[in-house]
């Protein structure tokens, strides 16, 4: 856990969030600034600044984050069309430096995304 990280504070219960899933490794909650009708954030409770810091030892955890994201997309009734996004670094649009998966859906997505 990183002391000044908002997502670590949410994971520890120190800061509130509209949680929709939680287990010992992963937490999911609704984004407070949604970019689509459904916008879920899925985070590992283990602090990693960005996807660029993930190592082989994190493979199972990152796979779990993605599986939970897909399960939540189905549960939220966006399983017929959703987008996964990981931003890595400021130039990619990352604003919270704790690795997190955006699950977006509930509307038609356009291409290219950026």
Image (cartoon, grey):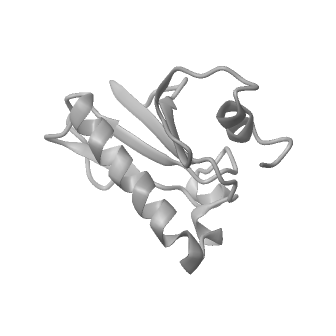
Quarter-of-image position of residue 47:
bottom right
Residue at position x 26%, y 28% in the image:
76
Instruction: Residue 74 in the image: state x and y as whole percent.
Output: 21, 37
Q: Residue at x 52, y 45 (%)?
A: 26
Residue furthest front in the image = 24
Query: Could you tell whether 2 is left or right of 35 in the image?
Result: right
Residue 42 visible in this rendered orientation of the protein: yes
From the viewer's perspective, is 3 left or right of 15?
A: right
In this view, the residue in front, 76 or 106, is: 76
Which residue: 56% across, 69% down? 58
Q: Position of residue 10 (x, y in %)?
A: 67, 31
Residue located farthest toward the left when viewing the structure as drawn: 80
In the depicted structure, whether residue 114 falls above or below residue 24? below
Furthest-right residue in this view:
3
- 59 on left or right of 45: left
Q: Return the x and y of residue 112 as percentages of the image width and height.
A: 31, 56
Location of residue 13 with respect to 24 vertically, above or below: above
Residue name at image x 41 percent, y 62 percent: 63
- Is residue 114 visible to us here? no
Image x and y of residue 107, in percent: 23, 31
Query: In front: 68, or 5?
Result: 68
Q: Residue furthest bottom?
A: 56
**Viewer-closest of 71 and 53:** 71
Vertical side of 86 occupied by 43: above or below: above
Is 59 located above or below residue 27 in the figure?
A: below
């Amino acid at each position: 856990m990183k002391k000044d990280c908002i997502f670590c504070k949410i994971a520890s219960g120190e800061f509130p969030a509209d949680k929709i899933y939680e287990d010992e490794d992963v937490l999911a909650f609704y984004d407070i600034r949604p970019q689509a009708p459904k916008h879920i954030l899925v985070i590992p409770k283990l602090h990693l600044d960005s996807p660029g810091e993930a190592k082989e030892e994190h493979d199972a955890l990152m796979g779990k984050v993605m599986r939970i994201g897909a399960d939540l997309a189905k549960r939220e009734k966006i399983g017929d069309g959703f987008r996964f996004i990981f931003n890595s670094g400021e130039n990619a649009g990352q604003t919270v430096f704790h690795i997190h998966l955006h699950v977006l859906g509930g509307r038609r997505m356009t291409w290219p995304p950026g």
